């Protein structure tokens, strides 16, 4: 059965930037609908690392990713934006002021502008090329995302990778896992300097073992039960690490899916935008958050929040042509009560 939805703005992606866009649009009396391929809102924060602490949200010294999403949901509740979850946007037709989006479930969304807040797109992990990998993935002995730290309590954990995820999870699991060994091909990590310094300090105290310079070579065990991870150095010399769980953090593969065929100007799988407005090469289509790129772009949640505000103000004349926008601060304007018509 086809469902027709009419709104002002279709937001493609319900991660932090997409959720905050609902708020910024709502404050300008602009209705929106959220569309996401995942079955829940929150994007990577909810699906990949809900218990991971985030330290760079202004005013919050630390907040777990899942808690941040819960706070954003509470913030946008007054605007009652409909949600089409577990759907993938397929087609885009029309022009600014009169777009039509279609989903893979047959829904049609008519809107005046589109905000792409798709994060990493349809994301998935970059898997290491190891024999028998699927068997250990199915049993949970190989995990690419940590949803509950307690699930790894008392486990012998091997972490592979040299970026923020590898370093952050080594620190987060310290004191929870029975042992932690970090495998990386070189001594330098591509992580925040403070986090890398904390990892070095933990290694110096003997709490975490650094296995450098090595890379993954083979998995040992059977029937989905892991007993060890074999690693090899650049000369081919191997070493066996006793392990119950392997956490390979080699980044996410990014796939914009059908959005890539819309005719947008792309830059290495990201959508190029005008920095002042976040408008793409298609008038009336905007991009914010990790999916958007421009000179000086930083992939930070707080930057996505700022882009949501800029895009909302740029969208106002499309939704309310000929109406002057008298900007008011939220401290003086207030927020609508839940259920109040925007």
Image (tube, helix red, strand yellow):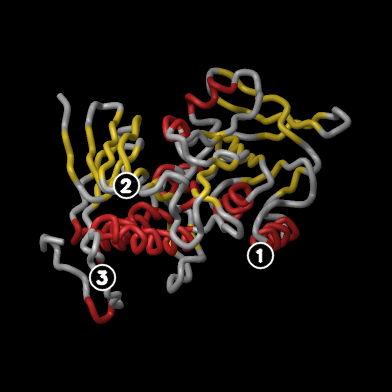
Is disc 2 placed on a helix, strand or loop? loop
Q: Earlier in the sequence, mark 1 or mark 3?
A: 1
Is 300 drawn above or below residue 323 in the view shown? above
Asked whether the beta carbons under mark 1 and mark 3 sit within 8 Å of each other, the answer is no
Asked whether the beta carbons under mark 2 and mark 3 sit within 8 Å of each other, the answer is no
Residue 289 position, x and y percent, is 46, 53
Q: Is residue 147 visible?
A: no
Hey, which quadrant is residue 248 in on the image?
top right
The residue positioned 23% from the left and 50% from the top of the image is 8
Is 265 drawn above or below residue 199 in the view shown? above
Q: Earlier in the sequence, mark 2 or mark 3?
A: 2
Is disc 3 placed on a helix, strand or loop? loop
| Residue at the extreme bottom of the image, as rendered | 332
Residue 215 position, x and y percent, is 74, 35
Hey, which quadrant is residue 155 in on the image?
top right
| Residue at the extreme front of the image, as rendered | 322
Is 242 drawn above or below residue 194 in the view shown? above
Distance from the alpha carbon under mark 1 to that under mark 3? 46 Å
Residue under pointer 1 = 194
Is disc 1 placed on a helix, strand or loop? helix
Q: Which circle, 1 or 2, is nearer the viewer?
A: 2
Q: Residues within 10 Å of mark 1 (few under 14, many from 20)?
A: few
The residue positioned 55% from the left and 55% from the top of the image is 299
| Residue at the extreme left of the image, as rendered | 340
Residue 96 position, x and y percent, is 32, 47
Using residue 250 as the reference point, say whether residue 110 is left or right of it: left
Residue 22 position, x and y percent, is 29, 56
Residue under pointer 2 = 96
Residue under pointer 3 = 324
The residue positioned 39% from the left and 48% from the top of the image is 283
């Amino acid at each position: 059965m086809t469902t027709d939805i009419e709104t002002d703005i279709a937001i493609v992606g319900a991660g932090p930037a997409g959720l905050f866009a609902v708020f910024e649009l709502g404050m300008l009396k602009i209705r929106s609908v959220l569309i996401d391929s995942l079955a829940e809102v929150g994007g990577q924060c909810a699906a990949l690392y809900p218990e991971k602490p985030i330290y760079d949200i202004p005013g919050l010294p630390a907040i777990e990713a899942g808690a941040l999403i819960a706070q954003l949901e509470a913030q946008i509740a007054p605007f009652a934006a409909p949600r089409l979850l577990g759907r993938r946007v397929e087609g885009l037709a029309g022009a600014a002021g009169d777009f039509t989006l279609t989903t893979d479930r047959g829904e049609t969304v008519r809107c005046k502008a589109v905000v792409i807040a798709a994060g990493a797109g349809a994301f998935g992990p970059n898997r290491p090329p190891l024999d028998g990998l699927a068997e250990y993935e199915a049993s949970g002995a190989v995990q690419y995302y940590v949803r509950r730290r307690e699930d790894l309590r008392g486990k012998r954990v091997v972490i592979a990778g040299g970026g923020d995820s590898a370093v952050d999870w080594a620190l987060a699991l310290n004191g929870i896992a029975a042992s932690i060994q970090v495998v990386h091909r070189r001594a330098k990590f591509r992580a925040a300097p403070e986090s890398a310094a904390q990892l070095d300090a933990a290694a110096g105290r003997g709490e975490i073992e650094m296995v450098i310079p090595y890379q993954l070579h083979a998995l040992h065990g059977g029937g989905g039960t892991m007993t060890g991870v074999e690693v090899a150095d650049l000369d081919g010399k191997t070493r066996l690490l006793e392990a119950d769980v392997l956490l390979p953090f080699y980044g996410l593969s990014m796939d914009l899916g059908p959005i890539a065929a819309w005719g947008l100007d792309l830059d290495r799988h990201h959508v190029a935008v005008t920095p002042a407005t976040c408008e793409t090469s298609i008038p009336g289509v905007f991009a914010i958050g990790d999916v958007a790129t421009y000179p000086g772009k930083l992939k930070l949640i707080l930057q996505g929040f700022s882009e949501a505000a800029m895009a909302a103000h740029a969208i106002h004349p499309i939704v309310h042509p000929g109406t002057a926008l008298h900007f008011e601060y939220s401290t003086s304007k207030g927020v609508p009560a839940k259920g109040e018509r925007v």
